[in-house]
Each structure stands twice: as C-alpha cells, then as structure tokens.
C-alpha cells in the first residue's frame, strides 16, 4: 500500500507479508477459478449478462454441463462442453454463455435516495453427468450508467461541458466522500467499523464513495455492502501522486492487476466508474516533480504509456458498462481530446476537480469554485494543542507557522 509510507492524513507505517487469506484448492475433475458477469442494457426491452468463466480442469476430453440460473425470475441456461473446445487443460476460459433478461421480469437498481436496491442471485453450476462438481454465486443487479459530457451550450462552447452521471437515464446529484484505507494496519478485522461508516453515510444522505488511489483495492464484502445500501463507488486504480516505471516487467504486472480487478468487480451495480490514477495528470501538468534527465516531455510520454496505452485498453475491452477516466482530477473528454494530458486538469468547466485552499478564508463563499464535479476536497485538521506543545513551542501553535509548514504535510504535500 503506497500510503503506508505516510500521506497528509496518516503516519508512516510500512507493512510487509501476506495480510489477506490464502487457500489451496484441490479437485478431481474441474474447479471454477473465476466467474465474472457483466450486466448492461440491450436495447430498450432487455438486459444482457455477459459471462467470462475461467476453469481449472483435469481432462480435455470429458463432457461437462454448465448451468446458469437466475432463480428469482425462473431463468436458466445450459451449455454442454468439452475443455478441448475452449483450449487445453489445466486452464480454459469460456466467454460465449450470455443471458438475455427481459426488463419486464426485473426491477431496476438505484442509488441511495433515488429508489430501491433489488439484487438477484446469478448461480453457476458445473456437472459431470448428474454429479455437481463445483458452483459459485454472484449477487447482481440491473441498471445503466451514462456520463453526460456534452457542451453546456452548443452556441457557446466556452461555457464548458457537463460532467453528469445518469443512472437508468436519470441525472444523479453526487453527494459523498472519499475513502482511504480504514486502518494503517490492513490485516486487522475492520468489518464492524466499515459497516458503521457505511450506514453513517446512508444516514447522512450520501450516495457515492470514491475509493482513493493511494491505498488498496477493497475486499468483496466492501462492494457487496455498497450494492445493498445503494452507495455508488468511484474506483481509482492504485496509482497516486507519483511517477511510475514503464519497463516491460512493471507493465506486465500492471496488466495482470487491472485485468484481475476489473473481472472481480465489474458485476457490482454500485461501481460507478474507473479512474486511472489519483492526481498524476495534475502532477505532470503542474510540474510537481523534478528528476535529473527526466523532462516533463519524458514524464508525459511515460504517463501516456501507462494509463492511456496500457490500462485504458484493458478496461475498455472488459467493461463496457461504465466510463473510464484517465485520471482524477481530469477534464474528462477534454483531456482525451488533448491526447491524455490537459494544461489545466483542475478546470471548473470540465470533468472533476480536487479543491484545497487551506490558507484562504474558507468562511467566504467566494473562496470556493463552482465545478462540474468536486471529487476530492477538504481541510487538513490540527492535532490537539496539548499533544503538540510537547514537541513544538507554544508560539508556533498557529496554522501557518513556519514550524508547522516545514515539518508537516498540512498543505497536502508529501
């Protein structure tokens, strides 16, 4: 976790080792490695469930049967297959088992405050003759997501563009917060604390949560709870405020990471959008980093290799049901038109912004921008005076004192 080396909201506590469960799986004939449904509208009368199924197998020549079912609406589909039809054991991938679901048989899923969150159980079973070998369930829902980035005025393009998410063709006013790792010690069981925070967000009438790109990808229960409560998830990929290598080994690792996360999460109705990184486009545009023999032009080239040429094609191929943004903040489609990096990614006329102005008078309304979407903002809080005067002089206990600005991350700078 990048943030384990400190951020402006937490201390430096690097950790190493295995901190999530691992398991050894054994099987006689066949085992489901991954089951990844993707749900999207199909015309005006249906939804289409596209399924990617990865299977470990023992024999290429045995005849198996797949059963896919949505019991709540009485829908079942079968496929008889041999592993040799899809490759060679020990691992094969099936991608041609799509299900067409009539809209009249289901209820739509909505964000908190806009309607209910009906969920359906999609079950996959694999048989050899009449013997059940393996099965897996996914909780899914039916909804559409569209990001409207049309011009505010077709007569005056200088007024900028919309950046408006629509769910089931209804514009959604996003109200929410950012989510950093719940603890600097991720191996702890934070289930109760997470559940409290999620239900608190619902009580506060929030409907969206941005998973920030300097932490880690949350576990399956995190996204399942968001599905149940109607919390939309803006999902950053885990790149934040840094320059990254683009050598072959690193890019291959990134490809595996992105593919794994997209296939793992794409069935969740709560997932609103993907974002390539946190503030890395802004960092290059604003010249945050100086490295000898590494000019802004070279930084830009490598940035595009990583996010536009490596990550974006994978997301575009595997998930056509929601938008992908190259960065946050960005100017959205305007960033794409500029080739992937804008001169001012924080423009209030396009895309999303991150807003921090700690040294200005935040009681004045004029301090604030009026953006299309504010995906990150805040004010750094101060520790207790009784704590800090043990380490600094009492006369330095001022928000903009030289001591605090020099020895802290109060301005959001690592």
Image (spheres, grey):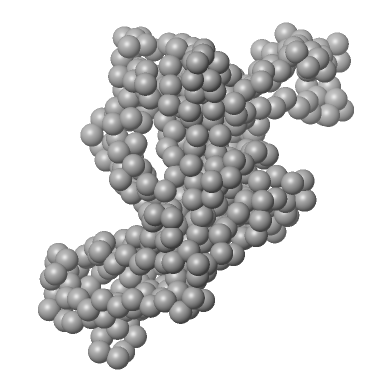
Q: Considering depth in this image, is 251 or 124 the residue closer to the camera? A: 124
As drawn, is 162 to the left or to the right of 201? Answer: left
Residue 414 lies in quadrant: top right
In the rendered image, residue 152, in percent from the top left (x then y), is placed at 54, 23
As drawn, is 387 to the left or to the right of 20? Answer: right
The answer to whether residue 372 is above or below residue 4 is: above
Residue extending furthest toward the front: 155
In the rendered image, residue 67, in percent from the top left (x then y), is placed at 34, 78
Name which residue lies at 66% across and 27% down.
Answer: 377
Is there any visible trace of residue 129 in the rendered image? yes
In the rendered image, residue 44, in percent from the top left (x then y), is placed at 43, 55
Residue extending furthest toward the bottom: 130
Name which residue lies at 39% across and 54% down.
Answer: 43
As drawn, is 69 to the left or to the right of 168? Answer: left
Q: Considering depth in this image, is 81 or 46 the residue closer to the camera? A: 46
Name which residue lies at 19% across and 68% down.
Answer: 90
Q: Considering depth in this image, is 327 or 331 the residue closer to the camera? A: 331
The answer to whether residue 274 is above or below residue 47 is: above
The answer to whether residue 67 is above or below residue 231 is: below
In the rendered image, residue 223, in percent from the top left (x then y), is placed at 55, 55
Residue 311 lies in quadrant: top left
Is there any visible trace of residue 18 in the rendered image? no
Give the mark count.
0
Name which residue lies at 50% across and 67% down.
Answer: 104
The answer to whether residue 246 is above or below residue 273 is: above
């Amino acid at each position: 976790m990048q943030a384990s080396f400190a951020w402006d909201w937490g201390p430096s506590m690097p950790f190493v080792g295995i901190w999530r469960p691992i398991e050894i799986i054994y099987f006689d004939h066949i085992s489901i490695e991954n089951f990844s449904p993707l749900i999207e509208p199909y015309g005006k009368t249906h939804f289409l469930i596209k399924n990617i199924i990865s299977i470990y197998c023992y024999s290429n020549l045995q005849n198996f049967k797949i059963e896919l079912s949505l019991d709540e609406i009485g829908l079942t589909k079968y496929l008889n297959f041999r592993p040799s039809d899809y490759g060679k054991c020990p691992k094969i991938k099936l991608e041609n088992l799509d299900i067409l679901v009539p809209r009249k048989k289901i209820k739509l899923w909505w964000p908190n405050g806009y309607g209910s969150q009906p969920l359906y159980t999609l079950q996959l079973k694999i048989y050899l003759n009449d013997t059940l070998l393996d099965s897996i369930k996914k909780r899914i829902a039916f909804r559409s997501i569209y990001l409207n980035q049309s011009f505010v005025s077709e007569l005056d393009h200088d007024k900028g563009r919309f950046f408006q998410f629509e769910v089931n063709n209804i514009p959604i006013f996003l109200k929410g917060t950012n989510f950093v790792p719940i603890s600097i010690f991720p191996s702890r069981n934070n289930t109760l604390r997470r559940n409290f925070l999620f239900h608190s967000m619902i009580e506060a009438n929030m409907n969206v949560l941005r998973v920030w790109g300097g932490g880690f990808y949350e576990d399956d229960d995190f996204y399942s709870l968001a599905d149940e409560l109607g919390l939309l998830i803006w999902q950053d990929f885990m790149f934040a405020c840094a320059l990254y290598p683009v050598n072959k080994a690193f890019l291959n690792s990134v490809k595996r990471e992105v593919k794994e996360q997209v296939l793992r999460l794409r069935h969740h109705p709560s997932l609103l959008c993907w974002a390539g990184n946190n503030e890395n486009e802004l960092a290059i545009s604003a010249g945050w980093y100086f490295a000898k023999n590494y000019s802004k032009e070279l930084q830009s080239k490598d940035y595009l290799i990583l996010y536009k040429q490596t990550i974006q094609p994978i997301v575009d191929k595997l998930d056509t049901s929601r938008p992908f943004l190259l960065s946050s903040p960005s100017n959205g489609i305007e960033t794409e038109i500029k080739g992937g990096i804008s001169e001012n990614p924080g423009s209030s006329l396009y895309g999303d912004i991150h807003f921090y102005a700690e040294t200005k008078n935040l009681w004045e309304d004029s301090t604030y921008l009026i953006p299309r979407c504010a995906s990150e903002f805040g004010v750094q809080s101060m520790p207790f005076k009784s704590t800090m005067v043990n380490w600094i002089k009492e006369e330095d206990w001022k928000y903009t004192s030289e001591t605090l600005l020099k020895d802290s991350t109060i301005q959001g700078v690592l």
